[in-house]
Image (cartoon, helix red, strand yellow):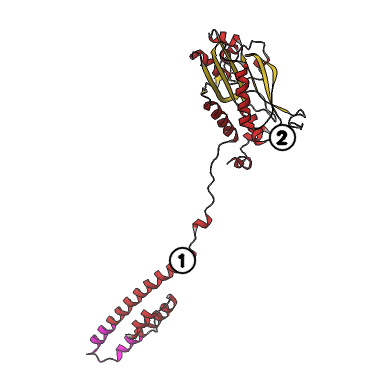
Amino acid sequence: MEHWIDKIDAADSLEELESIRIAIFGKKGELARAFADMKNVPAEEKPKVAKELNLLKHSLTQAFEKRKATLEAKALEERLKAEALDVSLYTPRPQSGALHPVMQTMDRIIEYFTDLNFAVETGPLVEDEFHNFEALNLPDYHPARDMQDTFYFKDGKLLRTHTSPVQIRTMMEQKPPIRMISPGAVFRRDFDLTHTPQFHQVEGLMVDRKGNVSFANLKWILEDFLHTMFGEVDIRFRPSFFPFTEPSAEVDISCIFCEGKGCRVCSHTGWLEVLGCGMVDPNVFKAVGYEDVSGYAFGLGVERFAMLIHKIPDLRSLFEGDLRLLEQFQ
């Protein structure tokens, strides 16, 4: 029966090995028959024959277990190879993050003015009436102080309606000359296609000895700034009124949608208002204790700039978290 060891070693599959096992170790297998034939062996030879059969059974069992382990390992390797996945083929593309278009626009604005050596100043979101209104020449009866526009708290505090209070705080803490911008969030009770309760402003201030700052300086820097942001557009300054500047002006650019020909966006005027500016009113300097100085100030809405730069028709879509819109700015 030693030839069975050769058959075991030659088995190519677990199925073939199982057939050999049944043929050797089964109830009707060769070993069973050999042990059954012991009854015909003379009594004096039975111990010797039994010992030989047990040694043979042990050798066959070892050969079988060894071959079985080899074939099982081979079968596992083949199965793993057949089921293997190339994960690099199915790895999703990484979703790279991106700044919100409003923050992208704000960064561009800040970069322009910091390149001109403007300092960036910040202040609290919760303000008092002095810094938000009174120091900015906004008397009690001014419409901007109406409850319909401002978020008031019971203790008389309020959410700042512009970043101009930062200019007041800076002037009260520093002596001129001052060259600064104050970017940040502001709050007003308004919500429609072009307004939201929270939005962002960047306001600028230049203060120096009287005679060192003029409207011509302001006009030059704003024209260069708007050309940097919007490219080759026409720019015009219109006389206007702001309580904290005198004289004051609103600044328009030729409509970037219709190139000044007139469309729905510009109300068929060919112009889009983008910011306000003017020479700082003497009453503001008086409120912060400045004397013999002159200065200019300007302010703009970052969301409006973002809408115009990216041609977004509805301001509210910038704050709805719609990935279909935001993914376009990666």
* Cβ–Cβ under 8 Å for marks 2 and 1: no
Answer yes or no: is residue 206 visible: yes
Is residue 178 positioned above or below 57 on the image? Answer: above
Residue 118, position as x, y percentages in the image: 52, 23
Residue at 32%, 79% in the rendered image: 60
The numbered mark at residue 257 is: 2
Quarter where residue 62 is shown: bottom left
Please name the predominant secondary structure of the magenta segment in the image.
Answer: helix
- The three-letter amino acid code for the residue at tag 2 is Phe
Q: Residue furthest toward the left?
A: 44
Residue 322, position as x, y percentages in the image: 63, 40
Residue 20, position as x, y percentages in the image: 40, 81
Residue 46, position as x, y percentages in the image: 25, 88
- Element at badge 1? helix
Residue at 72%, 33% in the rendered image: 259
Query: Is 215 within the magenta?
Result: no
Mark-to-mark CA distance, 2 and 1: 60 Å
Nearest the camera: 261 or 11? Answer: 261
Mark 2, other Cα within 10 Å: few <14 / some 14–19 / many ≥20: some
Q: Which residues are magenta?
A: 33-53
Residue at 42%, 67% in the rendered image: 77
- Element at badge 2? loop
| Residue identified by numbered label 1 | 81
Is residue 222 positioned above or below 58 on the image? Answer: above
